Amino acid sequence: MVYPLDMSSKKNKNLKDLFSNNVRKFRHELKISQEELAEIAEVHRTYIGSVERGERNITINVMEKISNALNKPIVDFFK
């Protein structure tokens, strides 16, 4: 049996919200700006703001860049 992926499901939105909120939380814990995080993660400075607002559907590669920049394992972003 094949189950279709419903990318608009509430569960997926909650995962995106969890990730977004934790990016902001971990960045604040380190007391760094969005611009500083963007520089460390090697993404554009406006990208971090849009991630934190939940406006981006980011790739695993970008998740890895952000998690490395914040010195956190990716799994911590979904707790």
Image (spheres, helix red, strand yellow):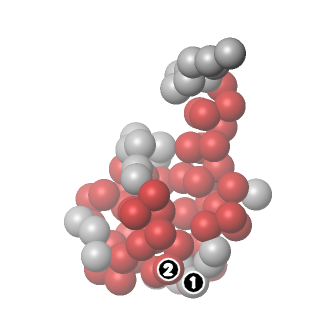
Q: Which residue is at a point 46% across and 80% down the rendered structure image? A: 69
Q: In the picture, which quadrant includes the N terminus? A: top right
The picture places residue 42, in percent across and down from the top left corner, at 28, 76
Check disc 2: other Cα within 10 Å, few if <14, some if 14-19, many if 20+: some
Residue 43 numbered mark, or none = none
1 up-or-down from 39: above or below: above
Would you say 54 lies left or right of 49 here?
Answer: right
Which residue type does callout 1 highlight? Asn
What secondary structure is marked by label 1? loop
Q: In this orientation, which residue lies closer to the viewer: 53 or 19? A: 19
Q: Which residue is mark 2?
A: 68
List the residue tagged with mark 1.
Answer: 71
Helix, strand or loop at disc 2?
helix
Q: Is residue 70 above or below residue 44?
A: below
- Answer whether residue 35 is visible to the viewer in this image: no
Q: Please state which amino acid type lies under the numbered disc 2.
A: Asn
User: CB atoms at circles 2 and 1 under 8 Å apart?
Assistant: yes
Give me the residue at 63% from left, 19% from top.
3
Q: Residue at x 61, y 34 (%)?
A: 12
The answer to which image quadrant residue 6 occupies is top right
Mark 2 to mark 1 CA distance (whole Å): 5 Å
**Which part of the image, by quadrant, shows the C terminus?**
bottom right
Residue placed most toward the observer, 10 or 49: 10
Task: Give the crowd class for mark 1: few <14, some 14-19, many >=20 residues within 10 Å.
Answer: few
In-image side of 43 versus 77 (left or right): left
Q: Is 36 situated above or below 1?
A: below
Q: What residue lies at 40% left-to-right and 50% top-to-bottom? A: 58
Q: Position of residue 49 (x, y in %)?
A: 38, 56
Q: Is residue 50 left or right of residue 43?
A: right
> Residue 51's x, y, as percent?
42, 52
